[in-house]
Image (cartoon, grey):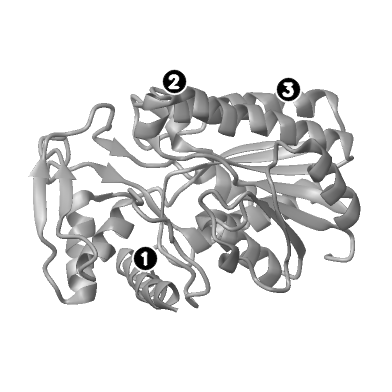
Amino acid sequence: MSDKFTVLVTGGAGYIGSHAVLALKDAGWDVAVIDNLTTGFRWAVPDDVTFYEGDIEDSVLVAKIIKEQNIGAIMHFAGSIIVPESVENPLKYYHNNSAKSRSLIDSAVRGGVGHFIFSSTAATYGIPEESPVREATPQLPINPYGMSKLMTEHMLRDVAAVHDFNFCALRYFNVAGADPQARTGQSTAGATHLIKVAVEAALGKRDNVAVFGTDYDTADGTGVRDYIHVSDLAAAHVLALESLIAAPGDNHLLNCGYGKGFSVLEVLDAVDRVTNLKINRTFEARRAGDPDSLISDNAAIMKSFPWQPKHADLDEIVAHALAWERKLGEIRKG
């Protein structure tokens, strides 16, 4: 398997990318990483993985990597992901997520890279009129982040139609947790993910956790989301790669979630259970654009790949996030 070619992971020093690197290595693949370290961490990339500090928009560098490393597939995680920032600074998102992806896809085609796995998002659906959300649900993004990702999906579809190239775009729901062996995790300062914020609060790194809105049309009035363990998500990327290789004429646009959801209060209750503490909760007005419920219909990915989630228990997701948060404190001290 791994003697055929190497997989290039963009953004491989970041949260999801670093987990994908581990999943590929664990499956026997040769891996190379490119990351500009704007939000990633050099220590998140294993020592035996070839690392290039640089930008995916640097077509000379990317061409060099493709040739030097015999790259046959790209997993593309590099990009900006903060929704409110995308509203305040849309040009940053259209540059980092759309224009740079266009450059990377161009480099892939020019370099003869046959397979491309793209980190997309449920934000491409905007505020869907149905839940669970199907792949056929209209994609009507309500912010530049979602639109910038949708533009890349369209680019991939158009390029695959005319080049010797196939792709899989995985639309993530709410990614959470950390590597079960605590080899990597969510490390960005000021992260906005609920479970990350909650375990920081449990360890005294934050004074409280804000609950935005208690008047949603849900069982307890707080927003419901589909939380997927990052290691299950990384495993789906490896299966996507294997599927693209096995069927070069096939492309995939797939939801990546568990098909079930938990409310904000249920998540905070889980953190209280796992830590045997009581997080201080503050209640604030709902944020614009937050849907009542956002849950994936994951039937398509379950049918397309032999994907069997291993970490779908909410308390386990929280426990892994907590273990990583403790280890992260040690890393920063060291």
Q: Residues within 10 Å of mark 1 (few under 14, many from 20)?
A: many
Q: Nearer the viewer, residue 81 or 220?
A: 81
**Disc 1 target residue:** 317
Residue 26: give x, y in percent of width and height: 67, 72
Residue 59: give x, y in percent of width and height: 79, 37
Tell me the number on the disc at residue 140.
2
Query: Relative to 61, does residue 272 appear above or below in the rendering?
Result: below
Dot placed on the residue nearer the N-terminal end, 3 or 2:
2
- Give SS at disc 1: helix
User: In the image, what residue occupies the spot 37% across and 67% down?
Assistant: 321
Tell me the number on the disc at residue 309.
none
Q: CA distance from mark 1 to mark 3?
A: 37 Å
Dot placed on the residue nearer the N-terminal end, 1 or 2:
2
User: In the image, what residue occupies the spot 36% across and 51% down?
Assistant: 191
The residue under label 3 is which amino acid type? Asp
Instruction: Identify the image quadrant of the C terminus.
Output: bottom left
Q: Residues within 10 Å of mark 3 (few under 14, many from 20)?
A: few
User: In the image, what residue occupies the spot 33% across and 59% down?
Assistant: 196
**Disc 3 target residue:** 158
Residue 50: give x, y in percent of width and height: 76, 64
Q: Is residue 280 left or right of residue 242?
A: left
The residue under label 2 is which amino acid type? Leu
The residue under label 1 is which amino acid type? Ile
